[in-house]
Each structure stands twice: as structure tokens, then as C-alpha cells.
């Protein structure tokens, strides 16, 4: 796995540039990301949305870049911006879609449309990467699947492992996170974790080492695992954390940003073009890092 995002960005820049379609680009943070991507020579951006608003924002933020981007004017209709962005991706006009002012739900509805969408697999999922002192770590799924069942969790694991491979980890250590480290029949998450761990041992899930159920302390601290008698190559050394539901993943991800101060990036996978749904409150740098992460996932 890359040591940090700077290393990831440099690796991506050494390959060919990509094109990011920004859905409803009439918002400052996403235009800031587009400007940063151009300055970093990371990606080109195709801006879909309200052309007069976009141009006014560019004139205010960076007048030297007013003519630096291709624009597709769809007015202020956010749902239309989502549909047009998906259509442009289907036509090969861009490699990645980044949410601008469009709501995540609006964009994902367009992406998952059975006739005109971009779905590749039965389950799409959000994979978040964060900078830990020892290297990048991954978390899934805190953005798409609300309360995944066993089948969906298996797909979430496989999607996260695919991303880990793209980021330089040939056999990531995957921790199935629950509240406790033992199987409890009254806690479905522990049963699912144990089944997925067993499937990995039986080579039904490959390309990784899976352990679960694991409480968070057992997954990140070798001494905590030792005290609790857990012997596993994953215990204390996890690269990938799979959470039981969206609440756990959402809280985990926001704590990384707002309490720990870590830089994060995330990408929705399982689609023909990676989808980026950062919060509208996120800064331009984070959104630019999301672009880089998506490009890394496209260039294995």
C-alpha cells in the first residue's frame, strides 16, 4: 500500500491523465478541486452544470482559469446534471464522475439506472482511504450500503480488496469489525464476520487475509490482541476495516477527519466509471485526492 497520498498522487501523475466529469460544478470547493487537479497536472475536468454560475465562480476564484475547462450547460437542474454526467461517462467523454452540488442520492440514482446507468456489479460500495503513520489504510462501507446482509458484505470485502490491490497491497489484511471479538448468536454482525473469515480460509474469497469478528482494538493493537488471546496475522496489523453498517462507517470516517486530523479520500467502486461522493462541506484538496485515488484504481 502507498505510504501516503503524496506518493499515490506522484504514481498516478507518472501514468496517463484522466478526465473527471463534475456533476453540477457550480460550487466553490469542487471548482477548487478542478483547479488543483489542473495545477498538479493530475486530470482534466469536464464541468457540467449552470454555465453562468460556474464562470462567475471561476472569475472570482481564479480568473486565469476561466477558459481552462470544457463546460456543458444544463442550467440549475441538479437531477439533469447527474443524468447528463452519467451519459457523458457512458459515451467515453470522461473516466470518473465527481459530485458537485448534486446530492449523492441524485447522482447514485442516475448511476444505478438499469437502462442508462453505469452499474457493473450487483453491489457497489464506498471505499475510504486514510493516511496512517505506517501507511494508507482502507475503510468500507460508510457511504452506500445501509445495513448490508451477508451477500452484500462479501461484495464489500471484494470491492475493498480490489482497491487495496490498486493501491499497492497484493494481499491486504482485512479485519471484519464488530463490537466484540467472539461470535454471539444475538449479534448478526459477528456471525457474518465469522462466515466471511471462514470463506477466505476456504479460498472462496481470495487475494487477501480475512479475520473476524474483531473488535477495533484487536484489529489495530497487537498487545490488545495478545491479551485477549487472539492469534492471527491480521490482529493488530489490519490494512482494511470492514464495518457492519453505514452508521459505523460514517462515524469512523468523520472521526478520522475531525478528531484525528488525517487526510482522507474515497471512491465508489462496482461501476463502469468510479464515482466520487465526498461531502459538499469537504475542502477542494480532499476532492482532488479523491480524483487521484479513483485514477489509481483505474490503473492497476
Image: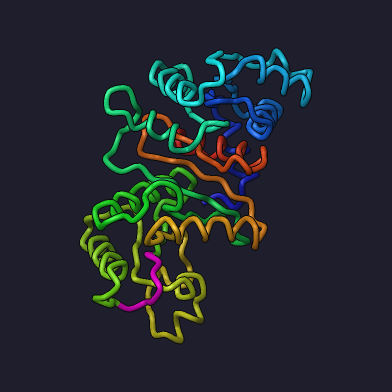
User: Does residue 186 appear left or right of residue 129 in this picture?
Assistant: left
Q: Quadrant of residue 187?
A: bottom left
Give the residue furthest to the front: 77
Vertical position of residue 275 compared to residue 228: above or below: above
User: Does residue 278 appear left or right of residue 60 in this picture?
Assistant: left
User: Does residue 109 appear left or right of residue 72 in this picture?
Assistant: left
- How is the model colour-coded? rainbow
User: Does residue 9 appear left or right of residue 216 in this picture?
Assistant: right
Residue 97 coordinates in the image, percent (x, y): 49, 29
Is 177 magenta? The answer is yes
Residue 264 coordinates in the image, percent (x, y): 59, 50
Residue 55 coordinates in the image, percent (x, y): 69, 17
x 27%, y 28%: residue: 114
Residue 274 coordinates in the image, percent (x, y): 44, 34
Vertical position of residue 211 compared to residue 109: above or below: below
Q: Quadrant location of the C terminus?
A: top left
x 52%, y 31%: residue: 102
Task: Work out whether residue 102 or residue 62 is closer to the camera in this orientation and state it.
Answer: 102
Q: Is most of the magenta stretch helix, strand or loop?
A: loop
Region of the chain picked out in magenta, as a range: 176-182
Is 263 magenta? The answer is no
Callout count: 0
Task: Work out whether residue 231 or residue 263 is closer to the camera in this orientation and state it.
Answer: 263
Vertical position of residue 235 compared to residue 296: above or below: below
x 28%, y 54%: residue: 154
Q: Quadrant of residue 147?
A: bottom left
Q: Quadrant of residue 107?
A: top left
Amino acid at each position: 500500500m502507498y505510504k501516503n497520498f503524496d506518493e499515490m498522487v506522484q504514481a498516478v501523475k507518472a501514468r496517463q491523465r484522466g478526465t473527471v466529469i463534475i456533476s453540477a460544478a457550480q460550487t466553490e470547493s469542487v471548482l477548487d478541486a478542478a483547479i488543483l487537479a489542473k495545477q498538479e497536472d493530475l486530470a482534466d475536468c469536464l464541468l457540467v452544470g449552470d454555465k453562468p454560475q460556474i464562470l462567475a465562480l471561476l472569475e472570482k476564484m481564479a480568473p486565469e482559469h476561466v477558459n481552462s475547462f470544457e463546460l456543458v450547460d444544463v442550467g440549475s437542474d441538479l437531477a439533469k446534471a447527474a443524468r447528463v454526467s452519467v451519459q457523458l461517462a457512458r459515451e467515453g467523454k470522461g473516466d470518473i464522475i465527481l459530485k458537485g452540488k448534486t446530492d449523492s442520492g441524485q447522482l447514485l440514482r442516475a448511476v444505478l439506472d438499469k437502462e442508462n446507468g453505469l452499474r457493473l456489479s450487483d453491489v457497489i460500495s464506498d471505499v475510504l482511504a486514510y493516511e496512517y503513520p505506517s501507511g494508507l489504510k482502507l475503510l468500507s462501507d460508510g457511504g452506500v450500503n445501509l445495513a448490508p446482509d451477508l451477500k452484500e458484505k462479501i461484495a464489500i470485502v471484494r470491492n475493498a480488496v480490489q482497491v487495496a490491490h490498486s493501491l499497492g497491497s497484493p494481499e491486504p489484511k482485512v479485519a471484519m469489525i464488530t463490537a466484540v471479538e467472539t461470535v454471539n448468536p444475538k449479534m448478526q454482525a459477528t456471525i457474518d464476520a465469522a462466515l466471511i473469515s471462514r470463506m477466505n480460509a476456504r479460498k472462496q474469497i481470495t487475494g487477501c487475509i480475512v479475520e473476524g469478528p474483531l473488535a477495533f482494538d484487536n484489529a489495530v493493537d497487537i498487545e490488545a490482541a495478545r491479551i485477549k488471546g487472539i492469534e492471527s496475522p491480521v490482529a493488530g496489523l489490519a490494512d482494511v476495516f470492514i464495518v457492519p453498517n453505514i452508521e459505523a462507517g460514517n462515524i469512523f470516517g468523520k472521526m478520522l477527519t475531525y478528531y484525528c486530523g488525517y487526510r482522507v479520500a474515497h471512491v465508489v467502486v462496482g461501476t463502469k466509471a468510479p464515482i466520487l461522493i465526498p461531502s459538499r462541506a469537504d475542502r477542494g484538496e480532499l476532492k482532488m485526492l479523491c480524483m487521484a485515488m479513483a485514477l489509481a484504481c483505474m490503473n492497476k
